[in-house]
Image: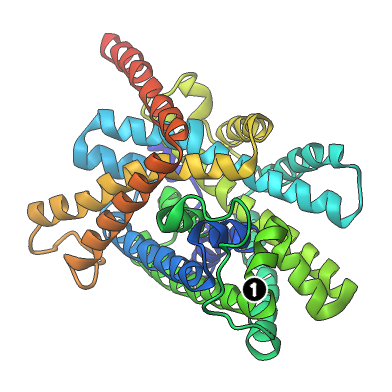
């Protein structure tokens, strides 16, 4: 029996859409306003960066959705890259997600949760990390029971997190006192660093999460049709939300103040708009938002580990390929990645961690986008395609070009981080060679 078939298909269109929106809308839109503006140099450029990041993400999502509609298997990029380029590249894509990208996202989001949690309840700063670890464990428990609970939790948190989004947009647009466009931050020390490309890179962390749905194709009802719909419509909702919140923020606060406030920008904005109680409610809403994002990550990335282990291409494969017979969830894979996430949040600050992680994953996104052309050439009639990227070939070309621009910008801005990214991926090659040789001997 195919062990993957035992995964319960508990995600319909509503839950899948909630997973896309809920996983993407987390800490980024609330905590990245200052860093995006600092890199862009002006509110106009920053707003364009948010829009550009969204358009790039939508082009990327459409491209991957076309591939996903042809390969409805648990594992996402691991499966896609393997089918298009071969086992070695597929393994490195999976290795990257399991060892670095997934845990880095879990760790950084948990770290943001801890920072906000201690601020909200006025606890000593030393409690930030323990709070982050507890939050990660709490969501891990939810994912260790039948996935209808994690699906329900995703729908609930996504619904709740949209309330502050709408409130910030309305307040900024109708009650803001500043010009949203044209403000510069050149007078603020140490702000204009990185440039427009790095500003887009910062927004991409806020847009991160759309690919998580592809990782759980084996748990989606009718994935060939549901996956593309959820990714495309989910991303459109997120883009409108992000550009709206950014515009509202620039209307409510001057540029220098936004940069100075940094991660506290939106909380300060909510407090100014709705009073101390409103600020606290905003903090609670952001905490719920972060839990929803964590849930999406934990739903998704352990499935990549599970898929790799099922293929015998991960250390201790027998353990990580097991599904709990009562809950139908890969609990060993879930808790292994939670432990890695805990280690990540202890190693470095969340901003640096997210930038490095985004560079790493986009290396493989580019391969996937090129893969759209390869699959089209193999299947020109589209017999096996349940979803075709609109405006082909423009959309995948846009995804490739935008991704290359961002990668080059990060190389110029943070070369040491790039070296770390490549080194983490490269370590996977000897691991693959050892494991593949063991398979041959068997």
Q: Quadrant of residue 196?
A: bottom left
**Mark 1 crowd level (few <14, some 14–19, many ≥20, 10 Å Cα):** some
Tell me residue 170's x, y (percent): 66, 85
Q: Relative to 127, say whether 191 is above or below.
A: below
**Badge 1 element:** helix
Q: Which residue is mark 1?
A: 162
- The number of numbered badges drawn on the structure is 1
Q: Relative to 177, say whether 108 is above or below.
A: above
Is residue 75 among what the camera can see?
no
Q: Quadrant of residue 266?
A: bottom right
Tell me residue 253's x, y (percent): 69, 74
Q: Residue at x 19, y 67 (%)?
A: 394
Q: Residue at x 87, y 77 (%)?
A: 275
Tell me residue 222's x, y (percent): 38, 63
Is residue 40 among what the camera can see?
yes
Instruction: Judge by depth and name the residue closer to the eye, 278 or 284.
Output: 278
């Amino acid at each position: 029996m195919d062990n993957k078939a035992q995964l319960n298909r508990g995600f319909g269109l509503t839950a899948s859409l909630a997973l896309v929106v809920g996983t993407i809308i987390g800490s980024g839109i609330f905590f990245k306003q200052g860093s995006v503006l600092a890199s862009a140099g002006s509110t106009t450029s920053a707003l364009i960066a948010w829009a550009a990041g969204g358009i790039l993400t939508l082009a990327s999502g459409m491209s991957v959705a076309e591939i996903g509609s042809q390969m409805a298997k648990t594992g996402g990029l691991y499966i896609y890259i393997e089918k298009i380029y071969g086992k070695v590249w597929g393994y490195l894509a999976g290795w990257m997600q399991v060892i670095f990208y997934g845990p880095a996202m879990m760790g950084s989001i948990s770290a943001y949760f801890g920072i906000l949690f201690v601020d909200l309840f006025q606890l000593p700063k030393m409690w930030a990390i323990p709070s982050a670890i507890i939050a990660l464990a709490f969501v891990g428990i939810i994912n260790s029971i039948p996935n209808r609970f994690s699906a329900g939790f995703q729908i609930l948190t996504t619904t709740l997190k949209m309330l502050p989004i709408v409130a910030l947009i309305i307040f900024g647009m109708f009650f803001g006192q500043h010009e949203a466009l044209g403000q510069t931050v050149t007078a603020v020390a140490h702000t204009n660093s990185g440039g427009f490309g790095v500003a887009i890179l910062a927004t991409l962390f806020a847009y991160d999460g759309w690919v998580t749905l592809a990782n759980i194709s084996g748990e989606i009802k009718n994935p060939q049709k549901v996956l593309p719909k959820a990714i495309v419509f989910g991303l459109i909702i997120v883009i409108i939300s992000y550009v709206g919140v950014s515009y509202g923020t620039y209307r409510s606060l001057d540029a220098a103040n936004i940069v100075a406030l940094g991660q506290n920008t939106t909380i300060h904005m909510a407090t100014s708009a709705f009073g101390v109680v409103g600020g606290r409610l905003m903090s609670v809403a952001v905490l719920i938002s972060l839990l929803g994002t964590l849930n999406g990550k934990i739903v998704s990335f352990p499935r990549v580990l599970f898929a790799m282990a099922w293929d015998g291409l991960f250390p201790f494969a027998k353990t990580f390929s097991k599904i709990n017979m009562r809950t139908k969830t890969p609990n060993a894979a879930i808790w292994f990645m939670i432990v890695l996430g805990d280690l990540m949040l202890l190693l470095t600050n969340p901003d640096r961690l997210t930038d490095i992680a985004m560079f790493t994953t986009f290396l493989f996104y580019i391969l996937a986008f090129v893969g759209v052309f390869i699959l089209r050439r193999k299947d020109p009639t589209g017999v096996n395609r349940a979803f075709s990227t609109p405006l082909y070939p423009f959309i995948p070309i846009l995804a490739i070009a935008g991704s290359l621009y961002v990668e080059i910008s990060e190389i110029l801005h943070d070369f040491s981080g790039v070296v770390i990214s490549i080194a983490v991926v490269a370590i996977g090659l000897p691991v693959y060679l050892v494991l593949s040789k063991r398979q041959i001997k068997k």
